Image (cartoon, grey):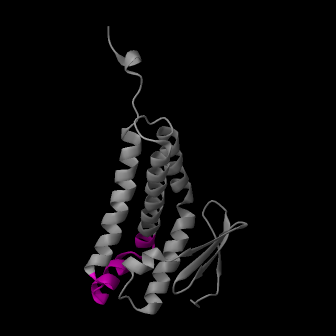
Amino acid sequence: MDEGRPFRVRSWYGLPAEIGVGRVWHWVKAGPVPLPHPGLVDLHLRQGLPRRERERLTYWHEMGHLETLPLALLHGLALWSVGRRRRGAPWWARLLVGLLAWLAGWELFAEFYTIARTGPKYARLYRKARTPMPTALFFWVGMWLLAVGGSMWVWGGYRRDTEDAEIS
C-alpha cells in the first residue's frame, strides 16, 4: 500500500470508486463524487499501531464506508422519515442529532466491516500494539452513544395522534 496512491475498487453493488489513504487526510472518490476527509478514526482508534497495519486497517475502513453505503442510506432514510414528524424539538435539533446519529452509525458500520474483513487479526493487532485505552474507549463508546442514542432520540419522539389511538 503506497500512501497517496489511490486504489481503484468496485463495491458489491457495482459503484466504482478510488480510495487514497494518507497520514491525516483520506480521499474517496465514489463515482464522480470526490470526498476528501480527515482520518478521525485513525486519530482515535489506530494510535500505537505500526504504520503498515494502520494503513491497511484504514483502507478496509474506507472500503467499509463504500460497502455499507446502502445500509447507511437506509439508516438515514429511517431517521429522516421519522425525524421530520417528531414533535417537541426544533427542526435544527432534529437535523443536528439525526445527522450525528447517521454519521456515527456509518462509522460503526465501516469499522464492523473492517473487523469482518480482517478477522481475528484485528484483535491481535490491538492487543500486540497496546493502543491507549482512552482513545479506543472514546471511539467505541462515543460512536455507540451518538449512533444508538441519537437514533433513539429521533425515533422516540415520534407519537401518533392520541385521538386516533384512544379506545372509546
Q: Which region of the structure is painted magenta? A: 114-132
Between 115 and 111, the one nearer to me in the picture: 111
Between 92 and 142, the one nearer to me in the picture: 92
At 38% from the left and 77% from the top, the residue drawn is 44
The C terminus: image quadrant: top left
**Residue 15 screen position, x and y as percent:** 67, 63
Q: In which quarter of the image is residue 16?
A: bottom right
At 35% from the left and 88% from the top, the residue drawn is 48
**Residue 69 screen position, x and y as percent:** 56, 59
Q: In which quarter of the image is residue 32?
A: bottom right
Toward the right, the furthest residue is: 32
In this rendering, the count of numbered labels is 0
Examine the residues drawn in magenta and state their main secondary structure.
Answer: helix
At 31% from the left and 89% from the top, the residue drawn is 129
Q: Eyeballing the image, is 143 above or below 49?
A: above
Q: In which quarter of the image is residue 29?
A: bottom right
**Residue 66 screen position, x and y as percent:** 57, 66
**Residue 130 screen position, x and y as percent:** 27, 87
Relative horizontal placement of residue 32, taking residue 156 as reference (left or right): right
Q: Eyeballing the image, is 108 above or below 86?
A: below
Q: Eyeballing the image, is 94 above or below 162?
A: below
Between 109 and 103, the one nearer to me in the picture: 103
The N terminus: image quadrant: bottom right
At 55% from the left and 71% from the top, the residue drawn is 63
Asked if residue 122 is among those painted magenta in the image, a careful observer would answer yes
Asked if residue 44 is among those painted magenta in the image, a careful observer would answer no
